[in-house]
Image: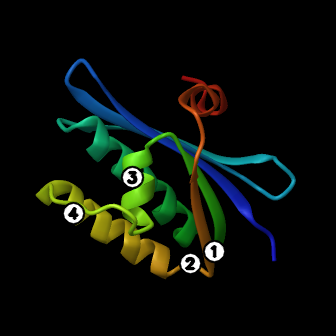
């Protein structure tokens, strides 16, 4: 089984939500990098959308064993089911993320400090 590392991040600048992700293979080689401006939204929504974008990419390309690192404790803990979610938009995004995760063979998600995430993503 070969695991892939996914680094995902979202944010908000000048009123626009944006996100990006990179996928590295089990040897550490970069195999995918995507960036997107989502439009209006919060930074928490952008974090979720970045994760969903990464999960969708992996599923579409048959990458079914992934370990995700992010700097959003909110997204991580809500996806893990440790924290509740009351916001209706985040609740919808959480449901989509969990549906994508359920399609994978193996999945883990963990926290990494922002400085590391920014360094890996180059922004």
The answer to which of marks 4 and 1 sits earlier in the sequence is 1
Labels 1 and 2 touching (C-beta < 8 A): yes
Q: Badge 1: few (under 14), some or many (20 or more) residues near its Cα, within 10 Å?
A: many
> Is label 4 or label 1 in front?
4
Position of 103 compared to 121: left or right? left
Q: Which residue is mark 1?
A: 64
Q: Is residue 115 visible?
A: yes
Is tag 2's residue or tag 3's residue first in the polypeptide sequence? Answer: 3
The residue located at (37%, 49%) in the rendering is 74
Establish if 52 lies above or below 104.
above
| First reached walking from the N terminus: tag 1 or tag 2 | 1
Residue 36 in the image, given as x and y percentages of width and height: 39, 39
The residue shown at (21%, 65%) is 92
Mark-to-mark CA distance, 3 and 1: 20 Å
Q: What separation in Å lies between label 3 and label 4 (alpha carbons)? A: 11 Å
On-image quarter of the C terminus: top right
Task: State the mark number for residue 75.
Answer: 3
Going from the N terminus, do you reach mark 4 or mark 2 first?
4
Q: Which mark is residue 104?
A: 2
Q: Is residue 63 visible?
A: no
Q: Quadrant of the N terminus?
A: bottom right
Q: Percent x, y for residue 31?
A: 71, 50
From the viewer's side, name the closer residue of 123 and 98: 98
Where disc 4 sits, the SS reads helix
Circles 2 and 3: CB atoms closer than 8 Å: no
Number of residues whose C-alpha sits closer than 10 Å to that of mark 3, classed few (under 14), some (14–19) or many (20 or more): many
Percent of width and height locating residue 14? 24, 18
Q: Secondary structure at mark 1?
A: loop
Residue 19 falls in image quadrant: top left
Q: Which residue is mark 4?
A: 91
């Amino acid at each position: 089984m070969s695991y892939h590392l996914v680094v995902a991040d979202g944010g908000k600048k000048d009123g626009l939500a944006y996100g990006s992700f990179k996928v590295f293979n089990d040897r550490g080689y970069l195999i995918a990098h995507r960036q997107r401006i989502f439009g209006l939204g919060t930074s928490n929504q952008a974090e979720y959308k970045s994760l969903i974008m990464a999960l969708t990419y992996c599923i579409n390309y048959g990458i079914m064993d992934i370990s995700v690192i992010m700097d959003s404790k909110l997204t991580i803990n809500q996806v893990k089911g440790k924290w509740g979610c009351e916001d209706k938009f985040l609740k919808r995004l959480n449901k989509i993320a969990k549906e994508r995760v359920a399609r994978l063979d193996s999945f883990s998600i963990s926290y990494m400090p922002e400085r590391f995430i920014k360094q890996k993503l180059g922004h």
